[in-house]
Amino acid sequence: MKVKTILIVLIVIIFKKFAQSQTTDYNNLGNWENICYCQMNDAYHPGNIVNADNNWQLLLAMKNGLTRKQLDSLKIPYTKSQLLLLETQRLLSLTKNVYKTSIPILDSVQTTNLRKQSQLIANDIYPEIEKPCRDLIAHLSEQNRSNNAYSILFSYVLDGLIWERFEKENVAEKWSGTGIWSGNYWFLTPKRSFVCGGTNSWSNDDEGFKFSWNWSKIEHITDGLWEINVDTLFSLAQGNPVSSKEIIDEFGKFGFLDENLNLAIPIINEKGNNTLCLLSNNIIDKLFATFLAKTNIDALKTSYNFNDNNETLVIVYHEVMFDLMDLLMEKQVIRLPKAFQFPDEAILTDAADLSFIVIYDN
């Protein structure tokens, strides 16, 4: 079944980085970074609800809880059906006549403080994973796929395998496959200078095959990847030959085929524990242990009034992950793919640098 799925210097740097936070227009949703680590279960993405009408204004107003009388005193227009919709979509809760926004909304002060803490954690983790990351990139270079380093490290390793480890060790909860969307959704401000959008995937659990691609809101070369023939792509990943001109045209335009018509994007065979798989897990072994040793989930939950430990881990780890990617770029271990660095110059064949295939136990 297919599923879409140094102290003074440091203070100056931090001040410059977050000075803009003091002038944030909170009502402008465009000033907020919203992250959804979630799965849609045949439901609207929660972002669609937040963006509709003046729902964001309502959620922002009810961040710390309001009664209907208090809400009315703010003169914010709303209807009862809006409140009901926000409740049913897990964006608003009602307890003892008090409406309170259910998802975390971190203002500029909270975001600044959280990112100071996540940077400290990332700085402790980085020395542990730098060499394993370099080893993985060296292997990709041997396969003439060094351009995939950013996306493999982000999408497959730091934002992929780590969640499997968190779930396996009962540190994070698995998504529910029923009801409305499952997972976590939250807002921070100001925005980071660059955060890639995340990872999209087509999965075929019957065959144990997943095609994934890294994407960003600033690029559009990956838009067409939702429409490709994933069954044929899986066949090519198994070593079957290209059988028609249509296949050449479909996959060649995205740069998925080399001059010999062999599949050119990385294939990670978890069933066979190939080298790319082993190198990726080596990074996760070190990342997982160091993150847990350096992160006080209970204290962070209390500091930011997160709903529970799972939500705390999800939000804090995402900030640490972005900091780790920034460190890898600052140390010139990786570089941004062309589609992210120069989106106006990117062409369809650059999509291959953002894509990979995973073969897993079904």
Image: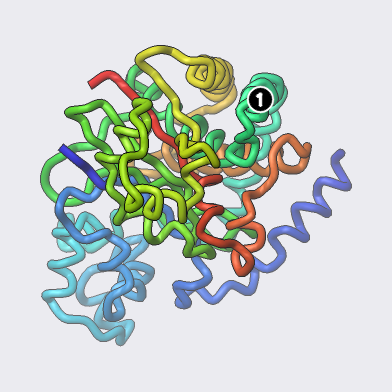
Residue at 23% across, 69% down: 67
Quadrant containing the N terminus in the rendered view: top left
Would you place residue 135 above or below residue 13 in this image?
above
Foreground residue among 174 and 271: 271
Along the line of sight, the residue nearer the viewer: 94 or 253: 253
Q: In screen coordinates, is 141 left or right of 88?
A: right
In this figure, which colouring scheme has been used for the structure? rainbow
Q: Tag count in the figure?
A: 1
Q: Is residue 1 visible?
A: yes
Residue 229 percent across, percent down from the top left: 28, 48
Q: Horizontally, is 107 left or right of 164 in the view?
A: right
Above or below residue 115? Residue 333 is above
Q: Which residue is at the front of the view, 237 or 223?
A: 237
Residue 3 place in picture, x, y as percent:
22, 43
| Percent coordinates x, y for residue 159 in the rendering | 47, 36
Residue occupying the point 70% across, 32% down: 123
Q: Residue at x 60, y 57 (%)?
A: 340
From the image, tell me which residue sits under label 1: 142
Q: Is residue 289 visible?
A: no
User: Where, quadrant-wise, is the C terminus in this rendering?
Assistant: top left
Give amino acid for label 1.
Glu
Q: Is residue 226 left or right of residue 284?
A: left
In terms of image quadrants, where is residue 163?
A: top left
The percent coordinates of residue 355 (x first, y second) are 47, 43
What residue is rendered at 28% in x and 40% in y?
232
Mark 1, secondary structure of its residue: helix
Q: Residues within 10 Å of mark 1 (few under 14, many from 20)?
A: few
Residue 89 vertical placement versus 235 (above, below): below
